[in-house]
């Protein structure tokens, strides 16, 4: 009889414990996460200001790769540089390799559900663009960038996976003349841990 009572007690305690729901990551008052994309590591902190709404900041160091989806013409002193100009072609190449070396972002984190959330806000970064010529890297130019970044993440266990999209104004750092363009960039895979 004693083993039967102990077995029933253990079964009931397991069932009750399994019915307890864990707090969703975005419901926590203080949210920490570490993410990686390509060869970059980022650290994010967010604080709950309202149910399902958080505010936070992120810093990223390393080689954060992003791909140009679309870009405007190069501009110099608000003049469009054309093919006839002796300095540059008129548009950035989507096959150039864009890298953020250091990036800082302030964001709002609305929870879309218990498993999905967004990080959306302004960012500023310093990095480089590597220009390809016949499948080899022919030149590198430092880039300064600022704009709006939106990230979408799916959480499971203590991990998250997602992607980032940036609408940015890119400034060339060392090209003569100093130029800029607007671009839409994608970081397709971001993986990390939530604490």
Image (tube, grey):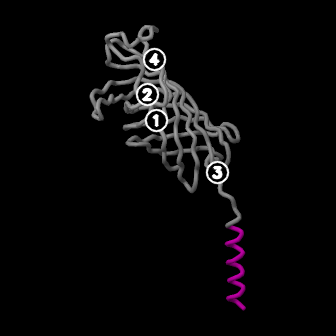
Which SS class for mark 2? Answer: strand
Mark 4–mark 3 distance (CA, rounded to whole Å): 44 Å
Residue at screen point 69% across, 73% down: 13
**Dot 3 alpha-carbon crowd within 10 angstroms: few under 14, some 14 to 19, many 20 or more:** some
Q: Position of residue 155 (x, y in %)?
A: 58, 50
Mark in front: 4 vs 3: 4
Q: Position of residue 141 (x, y in %)?
A: 32, 24
Residue occupied by mark 2: 125
Which of the marked residues, 2 or 1, is nearer the chain's N terminus?
1
Instruction: Say left or right for 67 vs 156.
Output: left
Which of the marked residues, 4 or 3, is nearer the chain's N terminus?
3
Above or below residue 105? Residue 32 is below
Residue at screen point 37% across, 37% down: 63
Residue closer to the observer: 164 or 74: 74
Residue closer to the observer: 168 or 113: 168
Residue occupied by mark 4: 73
Residue occupied by mark 1: 59
Instruction: Say left or right for 193 vs 102.
Output: right
Which of the marked residues, 4 or 2, is nearer the chain's N terminus?
4
Mark 2–mark 1 distance (CA, rounded to whole Å): 10 Å
Report how many numbered discs are placed on residues in the image: 4
Mark in front: 3 vs 2: 2
Contact, CB < 8 Å: mark 1 with mark 3? no
Residue closer to the observer: 155 or 70: 70
Residue occupied by mark 3: 24
Residue 13 on the magenta span = yes
Which residues fall within the magenta stretch?
Answer: 1-17
Mark in front: 4 vs 1: 4
**Dot 2 alpha-carbon crowd within 10 angstroms: few under 14, some 14 to 19, many 20 or more:** many
Mark 4–mark 1 distance (CA, rounded to whole Å): 29 Å
Q: Quadrant of the N terminus?
A: bottom right
Mark 3–mark 2 distance (CA, rounded to whole Å): 31 Å
């Amino acid at each position: 009889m004693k083993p039967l009572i102990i077995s029933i007690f253990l079964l009931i305690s397991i069932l009750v414990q399994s019915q307890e729901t864990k707090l969703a990551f975005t419901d926590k008052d203080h949210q920490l996460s570490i993410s990686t994309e390509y060869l970059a590591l980022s650290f994010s902190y967010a604080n709950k200001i309202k149910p399902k709404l958080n505010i936070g900041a992120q810093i990223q160091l390393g080689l954060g790769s992003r791909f140009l989806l679309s870009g405007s013409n190069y501009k110099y002193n608000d003049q469009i540089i054309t093919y006839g100009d002796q300095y540059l072609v008129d548009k950035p190449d989507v096959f150039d390799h864009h890298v953020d070396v250091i990036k800082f972002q302030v964001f709002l984190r609305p929870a879309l559900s218990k498993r999905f959330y967004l990080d959306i806000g302004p960012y500023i970064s310093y990095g480089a663009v590597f220009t390809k010529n016949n499948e080899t890297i022919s030149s590198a130019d430092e880039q300064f960038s600022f704009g709006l970044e939106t990230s979408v993440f799916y959480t499971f266990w203590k991990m998250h996976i997602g992607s980032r999209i940036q609408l940015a104004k890119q400034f060339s750092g060392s090209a003569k003349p100093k130029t800029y363009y607007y671009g839409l960039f994608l970081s397709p895979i971001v993986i990390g841990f939530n604490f």
